[in-house]
Image: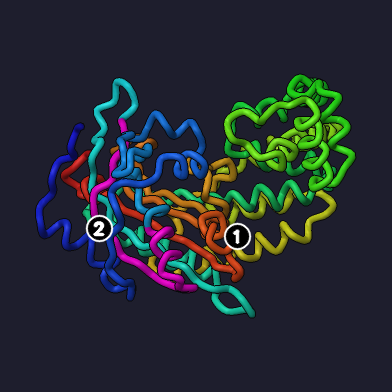
Amino acid sequence: MRLERSIPAEALDAIRAPFLSAGATPTDAPVLQPLGLLLDLAGEAMRSRLFVVSGDAGEEACLRPDFTVAIARQHLANGDGEGRYLYEGKAFRVAPRGSDRAEEFLQIGIEAFESYDSGKGDPVAADAEIAALAWASAAAGGRADLTLLLGDVSLFGAFVDSLGLTPPLGARLKRAFSKPRQLKIELEGGSSALGQAAGEEKSRIAALLAGLPEAEASAVLQELWSLAGIEPVGGRRPAEIAHRLVERAQAVQAGALSAGEAQAVRAFLAVSDRPGAALDAISALAGPRRATLDAALDGWRKRLAGLVARGVPEDRMRLTAAFGRAFGYYDGFLFEVRSAALDEERPVAAGGRYDGLPARLDTTRGGSETKTGAVGCMVRPARAYAGGGE
C-alpha cells in the first residue's frame, strides 16, 4: 500500500485551521465499513477501488474509502437530527493500475446534518459555507493555482423537468446522468435509446406487471413462483424483482428523446463557464415547464453570492453542468478544488450535498421521518501543500 508524503507540521496546522473555527464536534469513525453497503450506495464500479477485508464476524468489509458514509452512520446511530462533525484521519483507496497515487492518505473534513422541517435551516447558505471552508483550507497550503469547479446533480434534474418529458422518460434520463455510457445511448436519439430499452425487456410477464400497481405486481409474481414451485435467486424479494421488471417495461413504453430534446440536453451538458454566465446559458436553454429550474437557478445565484462573501474569488470559480462525482450518494450541489499542477483526478479538496443518504441509511425507522439535509467536504493536506504532489 503506497503512502503519501508527509508535510511540515506548520503547513498541516495552517490547512487544519479553517475547519477548527467552524464549530464542529471532533469525531472519528471505524476504519472498517460494510462492503455491501458501500457498493449499494456508490455502485458496483467502486469495488475495484476498495480494499476488501474480512470483518470481525467474517462478513465482507472494506477499509473506509472516505469518511462521509462512516460519519453519517454514526450520526444516525446517535439518534440526533442535527450535528456537525470534524474529522481527521486516514482513508484508503486502491490506485488505478499504472498510477503512482497514494493508497493510504490523510483527509481533514466536516460533515454537517441539519433539519429543514418547518422552514428551518438554509441549504443554500450551508452549501456556500462548506465549500468556502474547503477553499480556505486548500488555499492555506500555499498553492496559487487553485480553481473551484462547481456542479449540481439536481440542476440536471430540474432542467430535464423543464422539457416536459413523460415521467418514465424523464426519470430514466436523470438516472443516466452519472452513467456516461447510458447517457450517450439516451442522447443518440429515437431508435437507439428505444432499442436499448426494448433490448433489455422482452418479457410478456414484465409487460403484464407494468399495468398493475407495484403491490399487486409483487403479489402476482409471488403467486407465479408458488405455482411453479420455485424460489427467487440471490435472496431478492418479490417486491424488488417486480419493481425492476416494471421499470424495464415502462422504459419501453416511455419511448426515447426526440432529436430536438436530445440536442437541448447536449447543449445543457456543454455549459462550462464563469458561474454567472453559465447560469444565464442554462436559463436560455430551459424548456416550457421551467418553474422548478428557475427556482434552482435563483438558489444558485444566492449560493454564488455566499461563496464570494466568504472569500472565494469569483474569477477562480467555474460552473460545469456535466460535472458529477463517482459516489452515487451525492444528489445536489458538488464541488472540487483543483490545482493546475495536479491532474483532474487529484483534487485538492472536494465535497457536496447528499440529502438522500441519511434516509437511505436509516433502516431502523424505515427512512428518516424528518427532512434532514446533509453536506460535507474534505481536503487532502498532502495535495494542498505547495511543496507536495500526492
Dividing the picture into quadrants, the one containing residue 65 is top left
Q: 39 or 114: nearer the eye?
A: 39
Q: 334 or 263: nearer the eye?
A: 334
Residue 172 in the figure: left or right of residue 28: right
- Identify which amino acid the numbered label 2 is placed on: Glu
Residue with the mark numbered 2? 88
For the point 36% across and 45% down, the residue is 338
The number of numbered badges drawn on the structure is 2
Q: Is residue 105 visible?
A: yes
- Identify which amino acid the numbered label 1 is placed on: Gly
> Within the magenta stretch, is there residue 74?
yes
Counting other residues with Cα less than 10 Å from the Cα at mark 1, is it few (<14), some (14-19), or many (20 or more)?
A: few
x, y percentage for residue 89? 24, 53
Which numbered mark, 1 or 2, is in the foreground of this view? 1
Position of 97 relative to 366 (above/below): above
Position of 83 relative to 110 (above/below): below
Quarter holding the C terminus is top left
Position of 374 relative to 208 (above/below): below
Dot 2 falls on a residue whose secondary structure is: strand
The residue segment tinted magenta is 71-94
> Within the magenta stretch, is there residue 234?
no
Residue with the mark numbered 1? 366
Q: Is residue 340 visible?
A: no
The Cα–Cα distance between marks 1 and 2, rounded to whole angstroms, is 31 Å
For the point 25% across and 36% down, the residue is 103
For the point 85% across and 46% down, the residue is 213
Counting other residues with Cα less than 10 Å from the Cα at mark 2, is it few (<14), some (14-19), or many (20 or more)?
A: some
